[in-house]
Image (spheres, grey):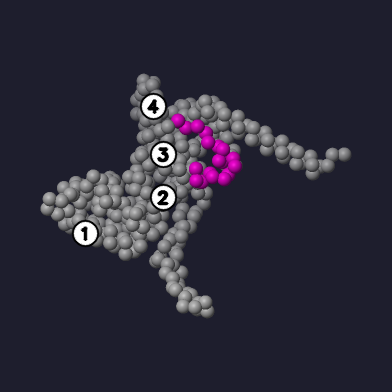
């Protein structure tokens, strides 16, 4: 008589082998086939849902996460907005060992070309599933030398606080015509690039200027605890003073970078350190640290700090992408279709004192 326990193990083993074999076969096929956003858009626009390899790949993507698959409203991996070809990468999802780290790197790869903040060192965390709490540095930790082995360390108040995050949704729409899709040989890279650029510009803008209300993250310039300085007549001596302020608060000196508005660069790139000396903003450097321009920065504003202390926390495994054949009667007459992409993200500032904002630069 067959032992029912042994029979149950045999069935479970057979099922696991079958699932692994299916995943392996899919990964082998994905070496020849790639996920296609424009093909997926055409499928969704038809009203029949995803077809072919896109359907098979995203179905496996959902199964590997233990999620339901909806061919009409699928979840696309972050890598779909990469301007490079996008194979399905389910290997890490199946073994579970490195999924979040892979998502972090994918997000950086997708968005970094369009984001001065990411280029300055903003930290990216992906794959969050629920509201998260991050530790925040309230003040630096101190210590003491012990005069003998019987001396106890003096207790100090807690020096770590916390900041809670919750998913906030940002959406973008991209519109194009049937004629464009027919005439342009391959618009896949253009559509991906447009979506990635629009999405990260929205996140960057909130990260700098967000009000923290009505579903918008709280931006850096509105955070309590950051340093502030006046930019009137901002000089080389003032920039050194900014660096001194950060150093006195034990900010990682090697990690400091500058981010300014376009007109801020115009002013400082024309102002000499001293008569006959180089300019304050010179060859994309200020005080020998990287200096970048961002249109998300308010006019006349400059920020110096350790940008790794600013975190972009992305929720979920990817993007929600929906398509409507025609958004209005005018779109119907012109043959215009619309794509809507939504991403869930929050912005976290771990160490406010690691930044100094200089306003009114003149």
Mark 4 — residue?
A: 187
Element on which disc 2 rests: strand
* Left/right of residue 294 with respect to residue 178 in the rendered view: left
Q: Of marks 2 and 1, which one's residue comes earlier in the chain?
A: 2
> In the figure, residue 351 lies in which quadrant?
bottom left
Q: Residue sitting at 57 percent across and 35 percent down?
A: 60
Q: Residue sitting at 44 percent across and 42 percent down?
A: 107
Q: Residues within 10 Å of mark 4 (few under 14, many from 20)?
A: some
Disc 3 versus disc 4: nearer the observer: 3
Q: Residues within 10 Å of mark 3 (few under 14, many from 20)?
A: many
Q: Of marks 4 and 2, which one's residue comes earlier in the chain?
A: 2
Q: Is residue 358 magenta?
A: no
Q: Of marks 3 and 1, which one's residue comes earlier in the chain?
A: 3
Q: Do the residues labelled 4 and 1 touch (CB within 8 Å)?
A: no
Q: Residue sitting at 48 percent across and 43 percent down?
A: 103
Mark 1 — residue?
A: 238
Q: Residue sitting at 46 percent across and 78 percent down?
A: 147
Task: From this view, report whether residue 13 is shown above or below residue 279.
Answer: above
Residue 306 picture location, percent across and down: 35, 55
Residue 110 is tagged as 3
Disc 3 versus disc 1: nearer the observer: 1
Q: How far apart are marks 3 and 4 (CA)?
A: 17 Å
Disc 4 versus disc 1: nearer the observer: 1
Q: How crowded is mark 1: few (under 14 residues within 10 Å), some or many (20 or more)?
A: some
Q: Of marks 3 and 4, which one's residue comes earlier in the chain?
A: 3
Q: Distance between the residues labelled 4 and 1?
A: 48 Å
Range drawn in magenta? 85-102
């Amino acid at each position: 008589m067959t032992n029912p326990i042994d029979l149950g193990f045999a069935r479970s083993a057979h099922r696991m082998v079958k699932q692994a074999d299916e995943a392996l076969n899919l990964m082998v096929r994905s070496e020849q086939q790639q996920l296609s956003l424009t093909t997926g858009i055409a499928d969704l626009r038809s009203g029949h849902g995803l077809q072919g390899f896109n359907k098979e790949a995203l179905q496996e993507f959902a199964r590997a996460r233990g999620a339901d698959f909806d061919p009409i409203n699928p979840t696309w991996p972050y890598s779909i907005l990469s301007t490079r070809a996008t194979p399905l990468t389910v290997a890490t999802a199946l073994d579970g060992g490195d999924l979040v780290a892979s998502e972090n790197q994918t997000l950086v790869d997708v968005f970094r070309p369009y984001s001065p903040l990411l280029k300055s060192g903003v930290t990216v965390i992906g794959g969050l599933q629920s509201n998260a709490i991050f530790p925040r540095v309230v003040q630096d930790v101190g210590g003491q030398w012990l005069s003998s082995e019987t001396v106890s360390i003096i207790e100090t108040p807690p020096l770590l606080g916390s900041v809670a995050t919750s998913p906030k949704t940002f959406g973008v729409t991209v519109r194009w015509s049937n004629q464009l899709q027919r005439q342009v040989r391959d618009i896949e890279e253009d559509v991906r690039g447009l979506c990635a650029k629009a999405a990260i510009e929205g996140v960057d803008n909130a990260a700098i200027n967000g009000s923290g209300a009505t579903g918008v993250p709280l931006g850096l310039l509105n955070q309590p605890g950051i340093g502030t300085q006046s930019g009137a007549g901002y000089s080389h001596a003032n920039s050194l003073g900014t660096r001194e302020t950060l150093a006195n608060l034990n900010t990682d000196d090697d990690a400091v970078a500058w981010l300014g508005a376009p007109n801020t660069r115009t002013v400082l790139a024309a102002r000499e350190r001293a008569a006959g000396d180089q300019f304050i903003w010179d060859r994309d450097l200020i005080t020998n640290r990287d200096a970048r321009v961002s249109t998300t920065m308010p006019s006349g504003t400059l920020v110096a700090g350790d940008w790794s202390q600013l975190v972009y926390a992305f929720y979920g495994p990817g993007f929600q992408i929906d398509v409507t054949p025609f958004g209005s009667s005018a779109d119907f007459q012109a043959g215009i279709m619309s794509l809507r992409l939504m991403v869930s993200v929050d912005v976290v500032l771990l160490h406010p004192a690691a930044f100094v904002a200089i306003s009114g630069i003149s």
